[in-house]
Each structure stands twice: as structure tokens, then as C-alpha cells.
């Protein structure tokens, strides 16, 4: 009898330890998720990345490295556990998942899922929830999917395979130019980088020429191009170029110079 009682007691004790560990682990996970959700709820102007694969993880790493807030959505519980950024576990087909990621306050949604069908669905869902004030960037694996994604509401469609081919060709023809652009855009080892600054409706520069604005003299940033509201570019704009609301200035300079440029445009 003593042996039986000891055996039962040992079993109950072991079961209690296992149950406590399971409850404690579940509770920690639940509290961690609640803290993360509160953090997401406080975000404004963040970027939502749909999909934590090779492409999605690279996108999130670059965005976070640039100092912007990022939220990752993935339906795979094991993968979402490896995400070092605020994240939401769920299927993009569920609108509530996008709402939990803060789509009402987000600036950009990146659809970087594995299939074009998933990215098409993510694009349609995001556009339906927010309308035209949300920027949507979608990944396309095939060229035939690109026009479909644009019709679904994507502002930009990126084909990583084609970009990879273009990049390899550029290395073959202009390796030093490509290396220089990589350093400016991604490396950060040089003091200079590229930046864009929009001319808004109430900007003090709207209606003035570049000569009148004296942007280079006052900020030190070098203006390399202007993008018109119709999407066309004017490279190396002349001093007589008149600025207007909707123009986007593209400039190169140091961080303080570019910050001064953004301030000068009223951004």
C-alpha cells in the first residue's frame, strides 16, 4: 500500500509540475501577445509586411533598420515565433487580422506572400479596408500577375526575379555605379544618402522657382531630380523650374542636409 501511495503521489506531483509549466508558458505567451498588441495599437504611419518568408523578412529588416515601425503578419505559428518585430498571427483572408495589425493607421502595406494568388487577395483586402490613402506594394512571381495586382489596387508591383536579373546585368556593365548606389541606399557607411521630399499644398516653396527657393544654398542638399504629379521625372532640373504642389524632390546629401530639405518643403 505504501508503495502504491508513493507511486500515486509521485505521479500526481509530476502531473502538477507539468500542468503548472503548461499554464505558466501559456500565460506568458498570452501576456506577451497582449503587450505586443498594445504596442501595435499605439503605432501611427507604420508599415505592415504580409508574409515572413525570405522576401518578407528582408523587407522588414530594411524598414526597421531605417528607423520605421513595422508589423509582420504570418499564418504560420512557428515562423511568427521567430519574428523580432511586432507581429500578428493569422490569415490575411481575415480582415480582423489586418485590423489587429493597425491597417487603419498604417502608411504602407507590403504583400510579400509566397503565391501571387495570396498577394492578390491581400491587395484586395487592404484596399477595401482603407481606400486610396494607403500605399500598397505587392510581390509578383510571374509577369502575367503584375497587371492583375495593379487592377486589384496595388500602387507598386515588384517582381524579385526580374529585379535580380536587372541587378546582375547592371553589375556586369556598371559595377561601380551599382556599388555606390548600394552604399547610399542600404549600407549606411557613407555620410550621404538619397531622400525624397514632397511639396505639399501649403508649402512655402509652392509657386517659386528653384533659383528663388535657394534650396541647395540653404540646406546643402543636392537636388538630382523632380517627380511630377503625373509620374514623370525631370533630372538635373534647371534653376528656372517652378515648384508646385504634388512635386516630389529627390536629393542627395548628409542626414542633416536632407532633414533641412524636408523642413524647407514644409514636410
Image: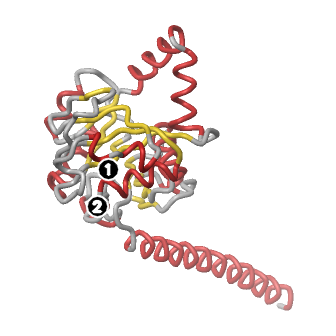
Q: Can residue 129 be seen here?
A: no
Please identify the residue farthest to the front as the structure is shown: 212
Residue 189: x, y in percent?
64, 40
109 and 217: which is toward the camera = 217
Residue 224: x, y in percent?
37, 32
Q: In which quarter of the image is residue 84?
A: bottom right
56 and 29: which is toward the camera = 56
How many circles with numbers are drawn on the protein? Answer: 2
Please identify the residue farthest to the right as the structure is shown: 2
- Compared with 147, 185 (above or below) is below
Q: In which quarter of the image is residue 195?
A: top left
Identify the residue at horizontal 42%, vertical 59% (top origin).
89
Callout 1: 10 Å neighbours few (<14), some, many (20+)?
many
Q: Is residue 206 left or right of residue 97?
A: left
Residue 161: x, y in percent?
41, 22
Residue bearing the label numbered 2 = 103
The reply to whether callout 2 and callout 1 are in contact (CB within 8 Å) is yes
Identify the residue at horizontal 34%, vertical 45% (top origin).
214
Question: Which quadrant is the N terminus positioned in?
Answer: bottom right
| Mark identifier at residue 45 | none
Which sits earlier in the primary sequence, circle 2 or circle 1? 2
Identify the residue at horizontal 21%, vertical 29% (top origin).
232
SS category of the residue bearing label 1: strand
SS category of the residue bearing label 2: loop
Residue bearing the label numbered 1 = 109
Q: Can residue 171 be seen here?
A: yes
Residue 206: x, y in percent?
19, 50
Identify the residue at horizontal 37%, vertical 40% (top origin).
113
241 and 144: which is toward the camera = 241
Question: Which quadrant is the C terminus positioned in?
Answer: bottom left
Please identify the residue farthest to the top as the structure is shown: 173
Amino acid at each position: 500500500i505504501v508503495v502504491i501511495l508513493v507511486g500515486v503521489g509521485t505521479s500526481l506531483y509530476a502531473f502538477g509540475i507539468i500542468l503548472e509549466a503548461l499554464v505558466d508558458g501559456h500565460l506568458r505567451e498570452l501576456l506577451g501577445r497582449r503587450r505586443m498588441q498594445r504596442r501595435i495599437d499605439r503605432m501611427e504611419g507604420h508599415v505592415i509586411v504580409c508574409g515572413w518568408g525570405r522576401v518578407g523578412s528582408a523587407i522588414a529588416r530594411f524598414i526597421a533598420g531605417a528607423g520605421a515601425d513595422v508589423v509582420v503578419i504570418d499564418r504560420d505559428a512557428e515562423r511568427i515565433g521567430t519574428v523580432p518585430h511586432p507581429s500578428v498571427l493569422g490569415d490575411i483572408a481575415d480582415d480582423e487580422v489586418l485590423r489587429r495589425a493597425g491597417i487603419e493607421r498604417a502608411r504602407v502595406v507590403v504583400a510579400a506572400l509566397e503565391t501571387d494568388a495570396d498577394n492578390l487577395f491581400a491587395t484586395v483586402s487592404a484596399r477595401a479596408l482603407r481606400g486610396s490613402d494607403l500605399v500598397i506594394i505587392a510581390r509578383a512571381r510571374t509577369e502575367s500577375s503584375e497587371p492583375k495586382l495593379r487592377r486589384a489596387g496595388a500602387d507598386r508591383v515588384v517582381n524579385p526575379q526580374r529585379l535580380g536579373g536587372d541587378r546582375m546585368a547592371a553589375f556586369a556593365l556598371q559595377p561601380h555605379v551599382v556599388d555606390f548606389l548600394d552604399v547610399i541606399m542600404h549600407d549606411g557607411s557613407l555620410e550621404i544618402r538619397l531622400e525624397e521630399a514632397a511639396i505639399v499644398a501649403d508649402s512655402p516653396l509652392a509657386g517659386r522657382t528653384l533659383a528663388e527657393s535657394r534650396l541647395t544654398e540653404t540646406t546643402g542638399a543636392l537636388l538630382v531630380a523632380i517627380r511630377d504629379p503625373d509620374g514623370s521625372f525631370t533630372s538635373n532640373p534647371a534653376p528656372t523650374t517652378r515648384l508646385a504642389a504634388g512635386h516630389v524632390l529627390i536629393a542627395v546629401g548628409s542626414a542633416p542636409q536632407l532633414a533641412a530639405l524636408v523642413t524647407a518643403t514644409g514636410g
